[in-house]
Amino acid sequence: MIKREAMENNLDFDEVEFFIKKYNSLHRNFELMQEVLNSKQLKAYFECAQYLKYVLIKTEEGEYIKKLVSANFCKNRFCSICNWRRALKYRVILNNRIQKILENKKVKFIFLTLTTRNVYYLNLKKEIKKILNAFTRLFKFKRVSQNLGILGYVRSLEFTIQKNNLDYINLHIHVLVVVTPGYFDTRKNFYINQREWAKLWQKALRVDYTPIVDVRVVRKRKKSNYTAEELAIFEVVKYILKDTDLLLLQKQKKVYVFKELYRSFKNVRNLASGGILAPKNFKKKISEEEDLVNVKGSEVQGKIVGEVEYILKDGNYQLLRFKGEENECKKNQNRI
Ligand SMILES: [Zn+2]
């Protein structure tokens, strides 16, 4: 887990290596994708990130830093490369927002997972609507909306394929809730325990069974370099469907399930926020038309000393051309 986290979240990780890994996983989904995309979209999907252009920046300290400035991303919602870029971007936006909050006040975080019973694939579209409406209801209940211990949230929708029956899908919502330190004070009646969350969620879902709700306080892990809130952000900003789940559908030839999944997910916002986490500019940034090139949110200070372009051939990125200070580029091209 730690290693995967480091690979997927460390912004300094060798990007090109990651691009290759992600690119190779795309090809495995061919049968699925050709069912839902037209020929133009399919071409864009399979050529996603085949072209990468970096600038090489020499910082005042004399260090060389790579920066992606151009790439042909397909922006498909099920593309593993684009989803990786999206996740990086949203993580940076959310983290910046949370750091700003932490500058002004002391807050804590709880992590909620709200589930429903597994959904038959043909009911998916209907059930997505239901779960999202239930979520809106939950946060409108007085116990939550007028709870002075609860300051805001960000929620994401996630699917997981049921390994023992691929015609069923588990739909759940992850919620990172920002709370005051006083939320945990038993004298104040702000605190909502697991049983109460489950009851509230049942009421919001309008079902006759008790749904499974997991609630935990977000804490820093001993062996992790990340702060508690960063770890929680990683959990909430994940992919809608894991690459491994897509692969499973492909392997088992469950094209019809994928088709329904793809259709059902159109126009669904899988990330949304409220309260303290949703001032206007933040909301806009989350939903705005994506720029998947600039995902790191920080400007590198220094002088551009070169430009390097790569093209993917036979499963590897090959140097297409470089411009600028030739020696610097040559010397540093394996770093890019
Ligand atoms: Zn893509």
Image: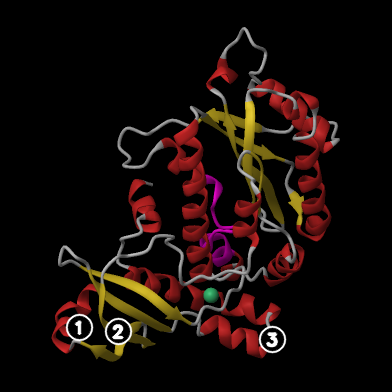
Q: Name the foreground residue: 2 vs 94.
A: 94
Q: Is residue 243 magenta?
A: yes
As helix, strand or loop, the secondary structure at mark 1 comes to helix
Q: Mark 3 points at which residue?
A: 38
Q: What residue lies at 27% left-to-right and 76% top-to-bottom?
A: 56
Q: What residue lies at 42% left-to-right and 61% top-to-bottom?
A: 296
Q: Which mark is residue 329?
A: 1
Q: In x, y percent, where is residue 313? A: 37, 89
Q: Which amino acid does label 3 sit on?
A: Asn
Q: What residue lies at 81% left-to-right and 52% top-to-bottom?
A: 129
Q: Which mark is residue 307?
A: 2
Q: Which amino acid does label 1 sit on?
A: Cys
- In primary-sequence order, the first of circles 1 and 3 is 3
Outermost top residue: 187
The reply to whether callout 1 and callout 3 are in contact (CB within 8 Å) is no
* Figure check: 241 above or below 208: below
Q: In x, y percent, where is residue 3? A: 33, 51
- In primary-sequence order, the first of circles 2 and 1 is 2
- Range of the magenta residues? 234-248
Structural crowding at the residue carrying mark 2, measured as other residues with C-alpha within 10 Å and reported as few (<14), some (14–19) or many (≥20): many
Q: In x, y percent, where is residue 336? A: 27, 75
Q: What residue lies at 29% left-to-right and 65% top-to-bottom?
A: 301
